[in-house]
Image (cartoon, grey):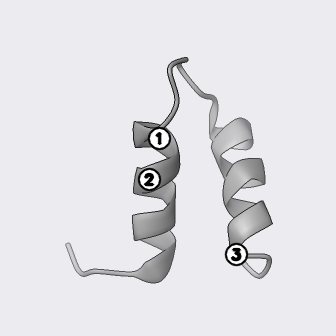
Amino acid sequence: MRYSHQREAIKKIVQNTNCHPTADWIYNQTKKIIPNI
């Protein structure tokens, strides 16, 4: 898998949560960091 800024941001978000996040939650959290995702 190739490196991407978006993939790295998603990885950090998932690693830093204590709950089982939904795809929508991950998307919304990532959108705060990368608005054009």
Q: Residue at x 51, y 73 (%)?
A: 6
Q: Residue at x 20, y 72 (%)?
A: 1
In the image, taking residue 13 as reference, residue 29 lies left or right, namely: right
Image height of 23 relative to 9, above or below: above
Q: Which mark is residue 12?
A: 2
Residue nearest the observer in this picture, 27 or 19: 19
- Mark 2 or mark 3, which has the lower sequence index? 2
Image height of 31 relative to 35, above or below: above
Picture coordinates of residue 21 (x, y %)?
59, 27
Residue type at the position of mark 2: Lys
Picture coordinates of residue 3 (x, y %)?
28, 80
Image height of 19 relative to 27, above or below: above
Q: Which residue is mark 3?
A: 34
Residue type at the position of mark 3: Ile
Q: Residue at x 50, y 64 (%)?
A: 9
- Mark 3 or mark 1, which has the lower sequence index? 1
C-alpha span from label 2 to label 3 = 13 Å
Q: Which mark is residue 14?
A: 1
* Element carrying mark 1: helix
Q: Dots 1 and 2: beta carbons under 8 Å? A: yes
* Residue 33, picture quadrant: bottom right
State which quarter of the image contains the C terminus: bottom right
Q: Residue furthest front?
A: 16
Q: Residue at x 50, y 57 (%)?
A: 10
Residue type at the position of mark 1: Val
